[in-house]
Amino acid sequence: MPLMLFILLGTLQLFMMMHARILTQLAAFQVTRAGSLTHANCPRMLHAGILQVLPSIEPFAKPTGASIAANLANAFDRYKNNTYNGRNINVGAGKSVALNGAGGTGALMWIIRNFGGRGAAGNDDNFDQSVGPMRLETQVVFWFPMRVPFANWVIARTMLAHYNMQAYSNQNPLMIRQKANWTGPGATLSAEMRSEIQGRLLAGEYVFPIVASYTMRMMTPLKAINLVPKNCALTPNSL
């Protein structure tokens, strides 16, 4: 019975993750495009990305008595600060303090920015010349919320074991002499990503990082005011 239950619920959760993967790839394009058109303005980039992944966070095409557009606007208003329902509070200097004791930044999305070609030249009249045009390179990490009961717990423990963050060796309740032995190869992850995954999963916040990248030529000159911080809000600048 537990195995059949996990197969059913796990399949549902995996299909939801596949849907979120497609949305994240689209979000990476929209984030980069928004930055390219707005002098690399982080709030615009962040909002463009959040709008794209909203369907995998909260369904807004549902019968509520309001229009789909109104439901979308209400959902966006709840998540536009890049946190799950105000889980974190911003204390300035690019730092945040977690509420309810959960670990990690609590972000909905990380946006990592790099500039190629002519580099961070500020308001450069020749930024779009054919010789060394300026490029915006972004990597989007969507912290997808796993909400299917039981399946989210199993996937979370499997992920911790796979990345050698926490081995799972609990007793098998059906066989007294048998214990689980979930360990993995310890796949390479950045220290920031490992810390975020471990902090949030061990605190019972079941999220799965979905990563997508995109590169686009800058259509507007990069403004110096948009260079700091390097990455968009709640994303560690060490990445």
Image (spheres, rainbow, N blue to C red):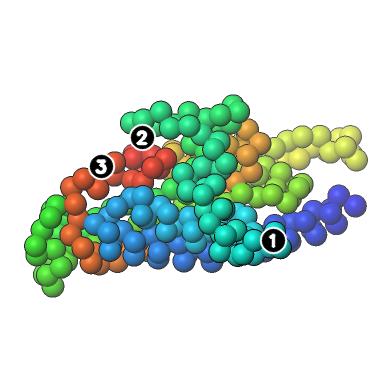
Q: Quadrant of residue 86?
A: top right
Tell me the CA gap for discs 3 and 2: 10 Å
Residue 213, image x, y percentages:
40, 60
Seen in the picture, residue 97 relative to 218 is either above or below; the reply is above
Picture disc at residue 65 = 1
The reply to whether discs 3 and 2 touch (Cβ–Cβ < 8 Å) is no
Q: How many marks?
A: 3
Q: Amino acid at mark 3?
A: Val
Seen in the picture, residue 123 relative to 78 is either above or below; the reply is below
Picture disc at residue 228 = 3
Seen in the picture, residue 179 relative to 126 is either above or below; the reply is above
Q: Which residue is mark 2?
A: 94
Residue ID at (80%, 59%): 8
Residue 39, image x, y percentages:
24, 57
Q: Amino acid at mark 2?
A: Gly
Q: Nearer the viewer, mark 1 or mark 3?
A: 1
**The residue tagged with tag 3: helix, strand or loop?**
loop
- Can I make out residue 189 in this image? no
Q: Residues within 10 Å of mark 3 (few under 14, many from 20)?
A: few
**The residue tagged with tag 2: helix, strand or loop?**
loop
Tell me the CA gap for discs 1 and 3: 43 Å
Q: Nearer the viewer, mark 2 or mark 1?
A: 1
Q: Nearer the viewer, residue 184 or 152?
A: 152
- Can I make out residue 23 in this image? yes
Q: Amino acid at mark 1?
A: Gly
Q: Quadrant of residue 116?
A: bottom left
Quarter of the image with the C terminus is top left
The reply, left or right, for residue 78 in relation to residue 239 is right
Q: Earlier in the sequence, mark 1 or mark 3?
A: 1
